[in-house]
Image: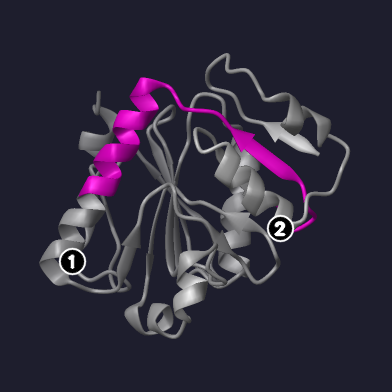
Amino acid sequence: MVRTLTELEYPIPPELIALTHQRVTPEQFERLCGEYREMRLELTSTGELIVMPPTGSETGSQNFNLTSQLATWFREYGSGICFGANAGFTLPNGAIRSPDASWIRRERWDSLTAQQKKTFSPICPDFVIELRSASDTLTQLYLKMFEYIENGASLGWLIDPLKLQVYVYRPNEEVVILDNPETVSGDPLLPGFKLKLTEVWSAE
């Protein structure tokens, strides 16, 4: 099945439409990603293909801002490995997901083979960020965040610029909802990392 999350009126290629009622295999998914590089594709644990056309400019600017802040922290502390929105990971449940930004402990990343690092690495990031766009429903994003936590993530942030809220996810804890926070801290998992939300809200 193809599920389309469209922020813009963007045409879906006929081949993807043809897969609407089919289960997509990881091998098919890898081929599709190579052919449709202009789109972000994800695969659920049940083989459902998720098609995410290019976002609007505002969402793109906000995503660049939060990724840049994570990169600045990384350059200062040099801890672990950071990834942007184009990186895909194969979770333990078989889903292939691409968080808007993520981070993995160095020792976990180094445990992968060179070949695994070149593909959709079989690992769930320790830290993930998802940024809500105008076309995303919160229900879809809630389920995605819980999936990350259930598959091994230690910390997850769902950032909602529409409501100026941040949802903080940790294993075996209730979700914490922050209303219009100036910052959100990654401590103790990411020591010293504070995301400045005022910059994300106003990114343009």
Q: Earlier in the sequence, mark 2 or mark 1?
A: 2
Q: Mark 2 falls on what kind of element?
A: helix
Label 2 neighbour load within 10 Å: few <14, some 14-19, many 20+: few
Dot 1: element = loop
Question: At 58% across and 14% down in the image, what residue appears?
Answer: 9
As rendered, which of 30 and 135 lies closer to the eye? 30
- Please provide the residue range marked out in magenta: 44-68
Kind of residue sitting beneath label 1: Gly
At 44% from the left edge and 85% from the top edge, which residue is drawn? 111
Q: In which quadrant of the rendered view does residue 189 lie?
A: bottom left
Check disc 1 and report the residue beneath it. 192
Q: Residue furthest top?
A: 9
Q: Nearer the viewer, residue 106 or 147?
A: 106
Q: Residue 44 placed where, x, y %? A: 71, 52
Q: Which residue is mark 2?
A: 27
Q: Residue at x 42, y 81 (%)?
A: 108
Look at discs 2 and 1 and give the one toward the viewer: 2
Percent x, y of residue 199: 20, 35
Q: Is the C-beta separation of discs 2 and 1 under 8 Å?
A: no
Location of residue 81 by image quarter? bottom left
